[in-house]
Image: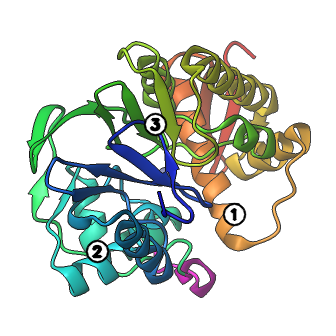
Amino acid sequence: MSGIELKQLSEKVFYLPGTVNAAIVLNEEREAILLDTGSDKDHGRRLKKACDNLGVKPVVIVNTHSHADHYGGNDYLTRNFDLPVYAPPLEAGIIQNPVLEPIYLFSGAKPLPELMSKWLLAKPSRVDHILEPGALELFGVALEIIDSSGHAHRHYSVKIADVLVAADAVFGINILQKYPLPFGQDIGGQIASAERMADVGAQVILPGHGEASEDIAGLVKANIAVFEKAAKTIVGACTGVAATTVLKRSCEILGITIKDLPRYYLNHCTVMAYLSYLRESGHVELALQDNELRWSAAGN
Ligand SMILES: [Zn+2]
C-alpha cells in the first residue's frame, strides 16, 4: 500500500493523521467518502494525494461539525473535484458562512482581527445535504450517523461497520494531557456524547485529534475524567466573581497559560459552556449586582 501518510483502521477505512484527523472510507468501486477535510487547502491537497496513492477517487465529503479545522479543506476539494457536501443541521449554516465562528466567539460582536485567522475562519463551503442521525447509505457504503453533540452544538460521529470515526466527541489521550480544558459548547451534551461512544458497538475509535484506539471504554473514561475535573475546578472558582475571573482562576488551577487571543476566546467560550451547564444542573448560581454578573457555587 503506497499511501505515504495514511493509517489503516479496517479493510475499507483509512485516516490521514495530523493536527486533525480526516478519514477516507472506500466503496467497492474504489471511490472514497471523505470524513472531514482538515484545516485548509494544504490539508485538502494532502487528502486528495492520499486518495491518489490509494488509487481511489474522492466522491463526497461528510463534515462532522463546523469548526474551521474540520472543514477548511472543503473549499479546495469542492472547487476542484465538485464533491457534494453533507453536514449536520445548524453547523451547515456556519460552514456556508464561516465568519459566524469568530462572531460567536466574540459574543456576537464584530470580531477582533486576531480572531479572523484561518485557525478560526475557514473558507466558505457549499453544503448540499443536511445529515440526520441514523442509517445512511452513501455511494454504496452503509454509514451510521450518530448524534454526538456537545463539543459543537450539532456534532455527528460516523460509524462504518466496527470503526467509529468519533471526530471531536472524544479526544485522544495525548490531547487530554495537553489540554485540561478541552473545547466544548454544551457540556451536558459533551459528557453524554462521550459516554455514548462506548455503547455503539465499535471495535476501534478515531478521535478528531490524537491517536486511534481499540480501548474505547478506557478512552471514554479518560475524557469523562477530564470533563469532571474541569467542572469541579470551575465550581471552585465561582466565589461571587465575574466569568472572566472564573476563567483566570480555573486556568491557574489547571496549569493553563493562554498565550494568544484565539486561545483566550476558545477557553472563554468553554468556561461559559461549563457555567451554563453547572447552573442548569444546580451547581452554581448567578447574580446580577452593580452591573456585573457574579458566579457563585450553589448555596454559598
Ligand atoms: Zn471541533
Name the residue beneath numbered marker 2: 97
> Do the residues bearing badges 2 and 1 touch, measured as CB atoms within 8 Å?
no
Q: Secondary structure at mark 2?
A: loop
Q: Quadrant of residue 114?
A: bottom right
Identify the mark nearer the N-term, 2 or 1. 2
Residue 110 magenta: yes
Which residues lie in the magenta part? 108-117
- The percent coordinates of residue 149 (x first, y second) are 37, 36
Name the residue carrying label 1: 263
Instruction: Establish whether ligand 1 lies closer than 8 Å to the Cβ of label 2.
Output: no
* Above or below, 56 relative to 187: below
- On the rendered image, what quadrant is the C terminus found in? top right
Residue 235: % across, % down: 73, 26
- The residue at 48%/62% (across/down) is 3
Which is nearer the N-term, disc 3 or disc 2? 2
Q: Amino acid at mark 3?
A: Asp
In the displayed structure, 135 sits above or below 244; it is above
> What residue appears at the point 56 percent right and 24 percent down from the top-left corner?
214
Q: Secondary structure at mark 3?
A: loop
Question: Which residue carries the number 3 mark?
Answer: 186
At 17% from the left and 71% from the top, the residue drawn is 83
Q: Secondary structure at mark 1?
A: helix
Q: Is mark 3 within 8 Å of ligand 1?
A: no
Rate crowding at label 3 as few (under 14), some (14 to 19) or many (20 or more) other CA atoms within 10 Å: many
Which one is in front, 290 or 234? 234
Q: Judge whether residue 15 is colored magenta.
A: no
Tell whether label 2 touches label 3 (CB within 8 Å): no
